[in-house]
Amino acid sequence: RKCIAVMTSGGDSQGMNAALRGLVRMAMYRHARVFLIYEGYQGLVQGGDLIKETTWYGVSHIMGKGGTVIGTARCKEFRERWGRRAAALNLVKKRITNLIVIGGDGSLTGANLFREEWPELLQELVEEGNISAQEQTECDHLNIVGMVGSIDNDMCGTDMTLGADSALHRIVEAVDAISFTASSHQRCFVLEVMGRHCGYLALVSSLGCNADWCLIPESPPSDNWEKKMCEQLCRSREEGARMNLIIVAEGAVDRQGQPISSQYVKSVIEKELGYDTRITVLGHVQRGGAPSAYDRLMGCRVGAAAANAVLDADKDNEPVLVGLQGNRVVQSPLMKCVRETQGIAGAMKDGNFKEALSMRAGSFVR
Ligand code: ADP
């Protein structure tokens, strides 16, 4: 029977548990054995109790839980060659040659590197006397399949990342809660949402919450944006609004690439308009709570497809990313997706915002 190991890595997000359940159930339906790796790459490097075989019922009742039930961690050791060699030893001892990673672009880059080095790592383990030549032959290749768990919706190769929809729900609920108090006092609210390199949450929540103004990293505002924003706020007050809402992505920048902070937006409004202005930074609330129906369903679909991808892969298969495109579950070359994603961050860093926005368009304009 084929052996698959699965881990969640990087930042947690809602929907990871549904993906885990979907893939375990599909893999077991196809008579494979599935091992859960606890605490991300930390568990892979440490082994022992952190790599445990699961059962059909081992993943029952987890779909409605936020975060990840098998834990996640940042792991310095996996960035080192000796750490990846220890990880390879832990897999070979259990005859595991299929690895599914649910994480962000960092975690998926690490998985790809692990696969590339796999034959050399096994050779070193033989030379050190840690595995036999027979174990080396039986485990001579490693299949990798990735799924993206990230509330930011910041990865190429999938229209949505697991967790982005639930995070949007949290933001919309927060705005609804704020709106009552804001309009009672005729206040202006500056809401800061997550998204270091990606403005998806800020842009889409602005549309869904009737925001007056929105600031995202991919599209810095024009030079005299402060004046235009204040005019917009005034106009909406004149037309009867009792409150204003400005949504700022945490990574928002101006045309020179300098950060635009929520504090700066507040100070501009207070100075120019004298409106009573408050800041709300939503922070980890956005990752909290139960996953939305969309994230649960998406998790089931991509999880099951990831199990199929890894079970159908042959030795020459390149690592793939399983995601959604146009509401279909699709496989894309993993490293192409990682490179495109990193290309967007690079374009923004170099001030090529138009290019960044057009590369992002796939996930923004759906
Ligand atoms: P994310 O997956 O959300 O982008 P990180 O970038 O923090 O999160 O990556 C999570 C973990 O993946 C790291 O702590 C590290 O163990 C591993 N990792 C990330 N990048 C690499 C890399 N280039 N080489 C090896 N391991 C990596």
Image (spheres, rainbow, N blue to C red):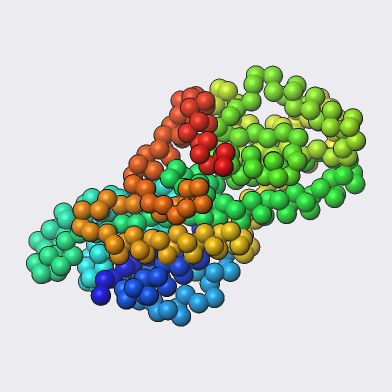
- Taking the spot 41% from the left edge, 34% from the top edge, the residue there is 343
Comparing 350 with 3, the one in front is 3
Q: In the picture provided, is 242 more to the left or to the right than 167?
A: right
- Taking the spot 55% from the left edge, 63% from the top edge, the residue there is 296
Counting the numbered discs, the total is: 0
Q: In the picture provided, is 181 more to the left or to the right than 137?
A: right
Residue 43 location, quadrant: bottom left
Relative to 95, is 75 above or below?
above
Relative to 238, is 101 above or below?
below
Comparing 213 with 274, the one in front is 213
Q: In the picture provided, is 272 more to the left or to the right than 224?
A: right
Q: Where is residue 313 in the image (x, y as percent from the top left)?
A: 27, 59
Residue at the farthest top position: 223
- Taking the spot 90% from the left edge, 46% from the top edge, the residue there is 184
Relative to 236, is 166 above or below?
below
Q: Position of residue 366 (x, y in %)?
A: 57, 42
Comparing 91 with 240, the one in front is 240
- Taking the spot 16% from the left edge, 61% from the top edge, the residue there is 140
Q: Quadrant of the N terminus?
A: bottom left
Q: Position of residue 107 (x, y in %)?
A: 39, 52
Residue 241 location, quadrant: top right
Q: Where is residue 113 in the image (x, y as percent from the top left)?
A: 28, 49
Q: Can residue 87 be seen in this view?
A: no
Q: Can residue 314 be seen in this view?
A: yes
